[in-house]
Amino acid sequence: MDLKKLAGQAGQFLTRAVQYTEEKIGSAEKTELDGHFESLSHQADSARHWTEKMLVGAESVLIPNPGNRVEDMIFEKIEKRRPNRLSNLEYFGLDMVQAGNDFGSGTAYGSALLKVGGAEQRLGMVEREFISNAVQGFIQPLRKFLETEMKTITKEKRLLETKRLDLDACKSRLRKARSLDGQSSAEADLRKAQADFDRQAEITKLLLEGVRSSQAAHLRYLNELVEAQTLYYDQSHKVMVELQKELASVPFNPSAVGAFDNSVPVFQINDEEIDLQSPSSP
């Protein structure tokens, strides 16, 4: 273990902590970045904020079950793929098909259940395909943007703040220097700190400028989401139109239902039938 190196790092950390504290209480000056840099930084923060919100919103719509979202994330990290699970519509359709088989395809209700159940299963498959396309074309690219570009920018901004604290600590030390040797040493440290700060500021600025150009890619992801959603609704509409045509062929006798709907409640008291809808009824 290099104790000298550790001691130097501890000294740097303490110097930064002192500089930060003095800035907060107003007893030390702080180097401000130019307005253009601050504008770029604000735009990057805004891009991260809204991308995170859109990502959460898209995941909530596409995968409403929080447990499934966690499972998907784990599978993507470990297996590099999402689990292939049936959708709720497919389970719903499966129940209908099983009920239809139990009631019998020769009955009107059983036949209708088989047709509707099959359509619900097809809708579920269409939905799964839509979710897969939306995840690949929209969610994954946005998540990658946050985990790569934005994470790198955050790291470099923190490093820039560290270089800025070192620079201002050197400025403060130079102002407090009394001897010529002390001033000479402080000036040398200041020149190095200024060079390190300027270099880090330029690196961070280039990264921040790249955020705006990434919007062109994000626009493409948005178009892919819309295309996937349009295809989903178009295919779903076709399934439902076809289902309506199939149901039209199922025999349905409305009089059988009307016989129950139009029935009059009758009670019998002491061998006498009383019509509850009759005006003369007590």
Image (cartoon, rainbow, N blue to C red):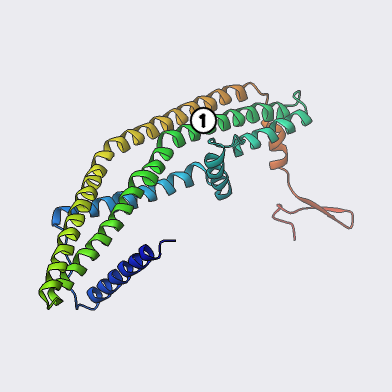
Q: Is residue 209 found left or right of 268 in the rendered image?
A: left
Going by the picture, which residue comes out furthest to the left? 180
Q: Hey, which quadrant is residue 125 in on the image? A: top right
**Type of amino acid under label 1:** Glu
Residue 198 sits in which quadrant? Answer: bottom left
Q: Quadrant of the N terminus?
A: bottom left
Quadrant into which the C terminus falls: bottom right
Is any part of residue 253 visible from this angle?
no
Residue 123 placement, left or right of 260:
left
Q: 152 and 60: which one is in front?
A: 152
Residue occupying the far right of the picture: 271
Q: Position of residue 171 (x, y in %)?
A: 15, 69
Q: Badge 1: how crowded within 10 Å, few (<14), some, or many (20+)?
A: some
Residue occupied by mark 1: 129
Viewer-side residue, 189 vs 1: 1
Vertical order, 160 against 90 (above or below): below
199 is higher (above) or lower (below) than 235: below
Left/right of residue 57 with respect to residue 24 in the rendered view? right
Give the image quarter of residue 139.
top left
Please report the residue visible at 20 percent of the width from the left and 51 percent of the height from the top: 199
Q: Is residue 6 visible?
A: yes
From the top left corner, tell me how far across and down residue 257 is, in percent. 70, 36
Q: Residue at x 51, y 30 (%)?
A: 129
Disc 1 secondary structure class = helix
- Measured as percent of width and height from the top left, residue 77 is found at 52, 42
Name the residue at 25% across, 57% down. 160
Q: Position of residue 23 (x, y in %)?
A: 22, 73
How many numbered discs? 1
63, 154: nearer the viewer: 154
